[in-house]
Image (cartoon, rainbow, N blue to C red):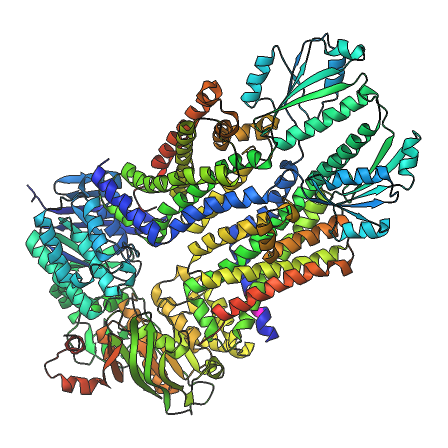
Amino acid sequence: MRIGILKAYILKEMNELVRSRLIIMVYLLPTMLLLLFGYGIRMEVTHARIAIIDNDQSHLSNLLTSKFEHSKYFDATTTFMDEGEALRKIKQAQSDAIIIIPAAFEKRLLKGQTTQIGIYVDAAFPSRGSTMESYVQGVILNAASGLIPNATNGSIVINQRTLFNQAMRDEDAIVPGLIGLVLLVAPAIIAALLIVKEKERGTIFNFYASPLTKAEFIAAKLIPVFLLHSLNIFILLLWALYLFEVPFRGSFWLYWVASEFYILVSISIGILISVITKTQIVAVVLTVMVTIIPGFMYSGIIMPISSMVGMSRYEAHVFPVMYYNHILYDVFLVGEGLASEKTQLYLVILALYGVILLGLGALWLRKEIK
Amino acid sequence: MQMMGMLKIDRVSVTHNKRIAIKEATLNVNEGEIIGFIGADGAGKSSLIHAIAGVIRFEGQITFQNSVYHSPSEAEKLKSQIGLMPQGIGLVLYDLLTVGEHLRFFANIRNITQDDRFNEYKSRLLRMAGLDKFVDRRAGNLSGGMMQKLSLICTLLHRPKLLILDEPTTGVDPLSRIELWKILDQIRRDEGTIVLVSTAYMQEAAQMDRVLLFDSGEIIAQGSAKELIESVREMTYVLTPSANLHSMSTLDTTYSLEPLEAEHISPTLEALFFVNALQKNRLLPPVEITPRDGDSSFASVVMEAIGLTKVFGDFIANEHVDIRLNRGEILGLLGANGAGKTTFIKMLLGLLSIDGGELSLLGKRIETAKDRQALKSSIGYVSQHFALYNDMTVRENLLYFALMHQIPMDTAIKRIARYAAELGFEEYMDAIPTELPLGINQRFSLAAALLHEPVILFLDEPTSGVDAIARAQFWQLLVALKEKWKIAILITTHYMSEAEFCDRIVLMREGQKVADDTIANLYTAHPNAQTFEEIFLEYYR
Amino acid sequence: MIRIFWSIVGKELIGFIRSWQLVLVVLYMFSVEVYIAGSGIEINPRNVAVGYVDGTAGGLSQKILTHLHGPEFLAPRRFNSQSELSRAIFDKEIIVGIVFDEDFEKKWRQNKRAQLDILMDATAASQAYTTLNYLQHIILDISKINIPVDIVTHKLFNQNADNHTFMALTELLSIITMLSIILTAVVFVREKEQGTWDLMLLMPVNPKVIILAKSFSQIIVVMTGIVISLGFVVLGIFNVPVNGSLSAFLLLSFFFVFAGSGIGLFIAAIARDVMQVAQLSIVIMMPLIFLSGAWTPIYAMHPVLQYVSFISPLRYYIEGSESIFYRGTEWIDLWPYFLGVIAVGGVMYWIGFRKIGRLF
């Protein structure tokens, strides 16, 4: 590696990235993805639109209704329409659930008779439907048990302690995982374009015909993207901390180092794709296919790795996103840092990934016309 | 004991996509020698060039500076001594970098110490290329000629001992070509560089120390230009129409293997192509154009542009251009790269908006796009790159264009069959355009433009990169079309020899018209000029 | 004009079929991708890893644990001490840890308050929450408390809350979006790059007809894919219920694909080369797909995003399709979706016509 040559090449790449406005993509794409997913994806159901048909209009029924009205999960409205009309509201997707309080609700309850509450839930979106169902049931049971005296006799009390995310905030659960996804996709796409662009354009001849070595060429392609995206590590951190207000409990240095390793892995994936493809469009499609889908599936956002069985468990271990996300969740929410052997191991694995992928790229890169 | 700077190529073969591109080429070149490679498209010139430059796998052995290599990786150690400029205008340039940045970049990746001596050399190259005033201009904004000059000086920065140039002058205007050659000549003399150049211009090849003629992957003749020309003198005659079956004619010359009862004229290197084709019995069908189906009576002035102007940002591409095109006339539109020829044609067609001036087509003022609708069926256009659909065969392409022109199906099939026979691409009807040589694509692009029997034909550099025989054939066609159909043709070209076939010439320079006259009048006005190229150059001095 | 329209459509279709790689990709997307999404991606909590420490002899504790079974839970793993359990949670091997105290069962038998300690990794919020819900139900069951309220729940439209059918449908809709945009954009930008578009403009045919015909050919390709995917995968394998009218869905799809190809045309009109098409498509498609309401209901999003989603045709399409398949909504109630999709498509074509559909 000759430093002067590298410097010249990197300068040229930077110039091109800036002038081709690709630099906008470098900084727009990660932030855009983070904001979109961060604000756009909610695992918990909030503001579910609930119509309560109160046929009783009693003190107790009002008590129950107000429980719904004061819950952050529901936007409850009390209406007097008949069931058919309410169902039509659901069909028009204007209402998500209906709760029907029967006419003699209070009377029966006070007499100790069993009364029936009907719930209709729109389960067209199944997981949302199930969640809504359990929320609604929870509220009703909660309210009901408050009405029954001596209910605690011989009962089991659940003393729950939520670790890492006490407030059970969706942002805390999703945003760190998103950083893992974003830093996989964005650097890979840019890197994938860099070599294949020269192939398509013809400027690759400058590499073929000059004494430039393969290592120098790859380094020249890697370093600019690496430096530019290193800034994204901090930008994304700032969004996470100040926009999404995710706590940060671990070591900043661990976050930084692991992220740099991870970017290296991501760029290496891009370079590898760039080496084996011939046209930019194919390179982009391939990159999207091998990064976005696994990045999302194995990020731990949708499903924790520990819940995976069979093939998907092995696949999760093959994609680097799992290792990085483990560290990410650690630095944001857990804060164990390098004290955990698993974190140490994963950090080493990330570094190995970078080395191996780069090695493959260098091996497959040809300095001649195919 | 061989000389230090000698290049020895020993039975080099290159196989590309399972097809033998060049077979057992052997060549010895001495220090300071300049060798020209000529031959049709796909004859194997580029493959040999890539092999020598060490950028493609090959069989055989190459020795340079007493170092032997058999593969690209073995050639690695010599790459600091070799300069390669591959084929394609501005191919190795980065559109977004300025001229100055290119020079710095190319110097840096070759690890050149940038001392006073280098800087002096660099500014000399810049001056020679005429680029010293454009150091801060981005490569993407340079004209084709300037791009090629920049590519050349970038290749020269590290003072290579072996310079390999693949068609550096194709699509480049005469002025830039001359400048390119000046640079080359100077460097060769100063540095003792070996230069290998492939070219489509025979006048250029004639200037070289030795010329190699390539045909179907083999070197079939080599020697000095003089020797090669002598070898075909016997077969070159003045134009003798329909001499015999074993002859070929251009607009002013006839080549025949059998002796003719006609006078000999002095051949050029182009004669080699014709004689070789005759020897291999690759004859072309004679050009015959049947009269058109429709009638030939229409306005006598088919196009009149008055003060046409086009502005891109702060760059004036066309400034008050007045051009008139008459019925039954071939008008040659000439000018350096970037003089505004293509812009002008695109304005005529409506592909670019007109920023000033008036335009009439077939006697009708063009004000809005609506005015063009009725005229579309009277205009034919062949663009610079022969725009054709690459996912359809030639036949399907032509049928599709016929459909779009709303020509009844039976008429269309008849016409296509007729053009295929007359333009000589019958055997390629079921091939995909990308598989065909440029010359064939050019002919059937012309057929596509003629399907609806237009009365005006706009041709934008239809002959660039096309080999000598195909070009000769093409011009015979144009002349026949003009005579039989009374069609008006506006054509741009960089081959100055082709200007001689035009009825009238318009010369453009920096977006302005600088001359507009017949060939004969231009020769009268420039009595010292021997060829049209010289006249052209006088307008640029 | 009609004849020309159809010949252009025919030509484009032939071109599409000849590029067999593209055909394969499209077929793959409509079949395998939809299948993978439907069978592979699971949003409902499943296989939650549970660990426990049991200090009791194991009567009641085992009774509670047996309720934690598949598919929602993996078999609970036993740990010897609480610190071991915490370690596993910190290393993300266990999501929910349950600690049974030594006197847990004793207290319960004595009718005292028995306390069950639960540790949850809340980074997997939905898994943790569901587990908690489950435990509450189990304990409620075991506790024999009599609450005099009977809750009767009707899950409408998708009784089993079957996630597979839903994911398959969602993936199909995303794929329709991507392909209708990209295929059309590539058709036009390729013509621009190769210069054939100039020739088309010079043909004595209204350029609008050419544009419509070319995009119509891609609409046909996507519609064919939709029918294949519906027949073999969505209805064939996953048995997605069709509570509404299938022809309403096909018609809505047609207009949506029209809108999608309008966006493709728009991208092609402003892009210079395939490279820019790729960049623009990513920047336009990502928000389109993720703001469509397929992942999170629109009303739960940030207010700004809610407004932005109004211009996304996919929003109307997804809501409309869910309504047709699951809610069985009547034609008359579907008009907002049709209107939304057609309006977006119309605007896109209008821009496309102005940008590349005319001579000067």
Which stretch appears magenta? C7-11
Q: Tell me the residue at 65%/28% (across/down).
A: C128
Give the overall secondary structure of the magenta segment.
Answer: helix
Q: Is residue A343 visible?
A: yes
Q: Is residue C46 visible?
A: no
Q: Tell me the residue at 23%/53% (across/down).
A: B102
Question: Quick check: A146 above or below B402?
Answer: above
Q: Nearer the viewer, residue B304 or A123?
A: A123
In the displayed structure, does residue C216 sit left or right of residue B53? right
Q: Position of residue A21 (x, y in %)?
A: 38, 53
Q: Tell me the residue at 86%/33% (across/down).
A: C150
The furthest residue to the front: A59
In the displayed structure, does residue A10 sit left or right of residue A158? left
In the displayed structure, does residue C141 sit left or right of residue B167? right
Q: Position of residue C109 (x, y in %)?
A: 80, 11
Q: Position of residue B83 (x, y in %)?
A: 19, 50
Q: Nearer the viewer, residue A144 or A178?
A: A144
Q: Nearer the viewer, residue B143 or A275?
A: B143
Q: Quadrant of the N terminus of chain A?
A: top left
The verdict on residue B263 being magenta is no
Question: Quick check: A292 above or below B453?
Answer: above
In the displayed structure, does residue A351 sit left or right of residue B270? right
Q: Position of residue C272 (x, y in %)?
A: 42, 61
Number of callouts: 0
- When asked about the image quadrant of residue B126, the answer is bottom left
Q: Nearer the viewer, residue C76 or B47?
A: C76
Question: Quick check: A217 above or below B165?
Answer: above
